[in-house]
Amino acid sequence: MASEHVDVLVVGAGLAGIGSACQVRERMPGSSVAILEARGAIGGTWDVHRYPGVRSDSDMYTLGYSFRPWSRPEVIAEGAAIREYILDTARERGVDGLVRFHHRVVAAAWDSATTRWTVTIEHGADTVTMTCGFLFSCAGIFQTERGHTPDFPGMERFAGEIVHPQQWPESLDWTGKRVAVVGSGATAVTLVPALAEKAAHVTMVQRSPGYVVAVGSRDPIADLLRKVLPGRVAYPVLRWKNALFALSFFRLARRRPELVRRIIRWGVRRQLPAGYPVDKHFKPAYDPWTQRVCFAADGDLFRALRSGRASVVTDHIDTFTERGLAMASGEHVDADLVVTATGPSVVPFGGIALTVDGARVDYADTVTYKGMMLSGVPNLAIGIGYTNASWTLKIDLTARYVCRLLAHMRDRGLRQVTPLAPGPEVPLAPFVDFGSTYVRRGIASMPRQGAVTPWRLPQNYARDVALLGRGPVDDAGVRFR
């Protein structure tokens, strides 16, 4: 039986996949579109993560879609509200019916003779195929089935329960328990105050400190603008305001790291009691924004620390014991429940095995083109967001660019577009200039980037608006046929 064929096949029904499918439907009327989702629900990250307190780590005016403004008053939103927003968007735009659930893409093979991708899909116990003219991977770079948990010595001896936030059991009850949260990233910063509401005590166990900044869950400027301006005017203003603020903060951190260190430290000291060992627990060894800065909504982490319901231990774990964690310093953290908030497992672009005309594609041998295509791989786009700002800002621009590219090809009778690698005179660098542990774990399997446009990832929204929103689609970095 012949495989089903669509013009554009989107992989993933999360925030990126739903937003991208909406844009293709709107900007490329008449094109057939399907969305393949490995799981059984729409929402991606925001459906996978159900741990207590899960929320956005970017403001919703930039994490939300440009074409469907976030209308709720909170700017730092709970995971359930974001999941509802994605679902509502899919229903409103009519793309919910395009999703094929429990369809896991495992391989895709490009054939230049037919100018088509043949996509291999696991659907339950069956293996099926589909073909498409353009493949748009919005599966991200993180494995959804499991997060990363280091193999700590003695874990098998621990008498309590060990849980990773990505696999949070719905029935788990931590009321009155002593909880140890291992990690210092955004997940840990979110979990600690949420767990502290019912736990006997929560200890955040970190190998080294991270930067934490208290931010309000409401934006008074946004509240004012929504009162005095129509939504169609207020939302773009707020989106640009927040995008430019995030970019300015990032650039200041890179250019004047010591100044930003002092500003953040001053903010932390204001949140904690006099005499608190701020430098021990909240003074990282690295510069700001060489790893992501964590945000504590309304200062909830610091409030939990002030109340005594939570504490921080900065030390290396020597071993698990029957009743908790033995630290390298000799200190013991008593725990009935250990939460390993130790980050995601990195799998490039959903782990899809790619071949082009029979030759296997090694992602690490490719160079990104405009942060959204891979050298030598035709008719494929990847949805990857910013590391220094909202993920959706870049996804939104990528989807818009894909539509411009497809329209250019349609209007000129072109069937194939292949990004080219830069010449040997262009230095190459890692895909992401970021020092987070999960990035370091997976960077060797990722593509690289070039030192100049269009192979460079500027991590700059304003530049990308010009490059992806208005720049030519037929520059020297691609070949059409």
Image (cartoon, rainbow, N blue to C red):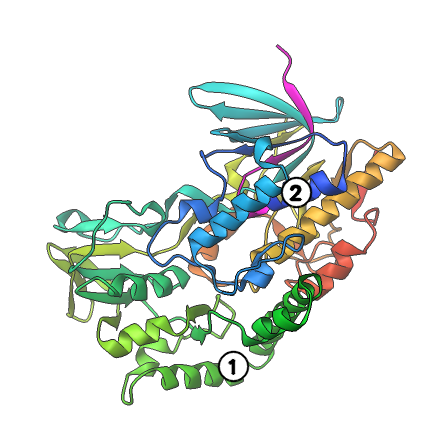
Q: Residue at x 57, y 36 (%)?
A: 96
In the image shown, does 319 or 201 lie closer to the viewer? 201
The quarter of the image holding the N terminus is top right
The quarter of the image holding the C terminus is top right
In the image shown, does 149 or 5 lie closer to the viewer? 5
Q: Amino acid at mark 1?
A: Val
Reading the image, the residue beneath label 2 is 22
Q: Which residues are magenta?
A: 1-16
Answer left or right for 108 relative to 472: left
Residue 9 located within the stretch drawn in magenta? yes
* Residue 435 x, y percent position in the rendering: 48, 63
Q: Amino acid at mark 2?
A: Cys
Mark 2 or mark 1, earlier in chain: 2
Outermost residue on the bottom side: it is: 274
Q: Residue at x 73, y 60 (%)?
A: 465
Reading the image, the residue beneath label 1 is 260
Outermost residue on the right side: it is: 412
Q: Residue at x 50, y 19 (%)?
A: 127
Q: Quadrant of residue 471?
A: bottom right
